[in-house]
């Protein structure tokens, strides 16, 4: 089995305690990033993925719809197991009930 870490570097602002690659970005930059991530999912080896971890930055700031888009691409490539463990780092001020529902689905 294979685990994947997907780094989402975007945040509302860079916190002074954070040592990770993270920064604020405009909508165009975030869009380019997700398109490149989706493109890269096709390069994963054909081993089944049983764990996906979204870290960053603040992946919840990036948006649940974008995270689902990346996961859908992994499913289309035939790599993501249906029983995969998926973890998304969230910040309480950048997540909503509806976003949590979408991620859960």
Image (tube, rainbow, N blue to C red):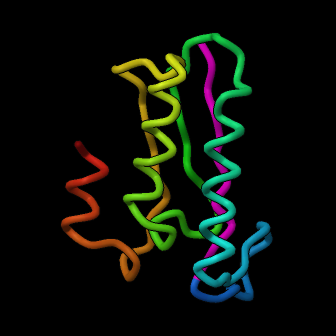
Q: How many marks?
A: 0
Left/right of residue 58 with respect to residue 105 in the rendered view: right
Camera-side residue: 80 or 19?
80
x, y percent for residue 42: 66, 28
**What residue is rendered at 56% in x and 69% in y?**
58
| As drawn, 49 above or below 104 | above
Left/right of residue 66 with respect to residue 15 in the rendered view: left
| As drawn, 73 above or below 75 | below
Residue 8 quadrant: bottom right
**What residue is rendered at 71% in x and 16% in y?**
45
Camera-side residue: 82 or 72?
72
**What residue is rendered at 77% in x and 67% in y?**
20
Left/right of residue 19 with respect to residue 59 in the rendered view: right
x, y percent for residue 67: 46, 52
Queried whether the magenta region covers residue 8, the answer comes back as yes
Instruction: Report the quarter where the C terminus lies.
Output: top left
Camera-side residue: 74 or 93?
74
The magenta segment: 1-11
Camera-side residue: 14 or 32?
32
The kind of secondary structure the magenta stretch mainly shows is strand
x, y percent for residue 2: 63, 19
Instruction: Report the quarter where the N terminus lies.
Output: top right
x, y percent for residue 66: 46, 57
**What residue is rendered at 70% in x and 85% in y?**
14
Queried whether the magenta region covers residue 105, the answer comes back as no
């Amino acid at each position: 089995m294979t685990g994947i870490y997907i780094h989402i570097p975007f945040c509302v602002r860079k916190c002074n305690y954070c040592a990770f690659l993270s920064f604020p970005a405009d909508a165009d930059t975030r869009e380019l990033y997700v398109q490149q991530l989706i493109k890269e999912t096709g390069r994963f080896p054909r081993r089944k993925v049983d764990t996906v971890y979204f870290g960053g930055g603040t992946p919840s700031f990036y948006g649940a719809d974008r995270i689902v888009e990346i996961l859908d691409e992994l499913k289309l490539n035939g790599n993501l197991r249906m029983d995969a463990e998926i973890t998304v780092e969230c910040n309480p001020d950048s997540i909503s009930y509806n976003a949590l529902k979408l991620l859960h689905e």
